[in-house]
Image (tube, rainbow, N blue to C red):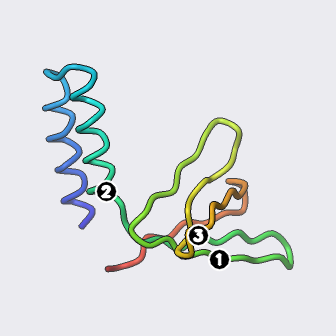
Amino acid sequence: MKIIKIALLAVFLGILAGCTQDQQNQLSRKVVELLDSDYQVTYANGSTSKSWIIKNGKVTTNEKGYYYFWDEHKHYVQVPIENTFIEELDR
């Protein structure tokens, strides 16, 4: 599955070079849809441990040091990158 994702990304980057900005945005959204997957995100710090399941979604981050995602119950979650583990689940 990961090899397919890498191949799709390589094709996407090749196509992207000859497109307008609007076409690039549309293609980018389509690739993100293809790369969505199932994940388990676990935050563990000392005696505190919490896990979330992400169905057909993605985990994003920014320069402030947090992961952001929507869990399987459609709750928006923000957790610090430190002490957080992400595991891709088999479909």
Q: Residue at x 70, y 38 (%)?
A: 64
Q: Is residue 18 left or right of residue 69?
A: left
Characterize the local packing of mark 3: few (<14), some (14-19) or many (20 or more) Cα atoms within 10 angstroms: many
* Quarter of image, res 48: bottom right
Residue found at x 41% / y 76%: 89
What kind of residue is marked 1?
Answer: Ser
Above or below residue 86? Residue 89 is below
Spatial CA distance of label 2 from label 1 is: 22 Å
What is the quadrant of the N terminus in the image? bottom left
- Residue 27 place in picture, x, y as percent: 23, 38
Q: Are marks 3 and 1 in contact (CB under 8 Å)?
A: yes
Element type where label 1 sits in the image: strand
Between 27 and 86, the one lying in front of the other is 27
Out of 62 and 19, give the one closest to the viewer: 19
Disc 3 or 1, which lies upstream in sequence?
3
The residue carrying pointer 1 sits among few (fewer than 14), some (14 to 19) or many (20 or more) residues within 10 Å by Cα, namely few
- The residue wearing badge 1 is 51
Q: Which residue is mark 2?
A: 35
On the image, numbered disc 3 is attached to which residue?
41
Instruction: Specify few, some or many for label 2: CA neighbours under 10 Å numbering under 14, 14-19, or 20 or more.
Output: some
For residue 19, above or below residue 44: above
x, y (%) of residue 50?
72, 76
Q: Quote the CA–CA distance across marks 3 and 1.
A: 6 Å
Label disc, if present, on residue 32 of the rendered structure: none
Q: Residue flagged by tag 3: what amino acid is it? A: Val
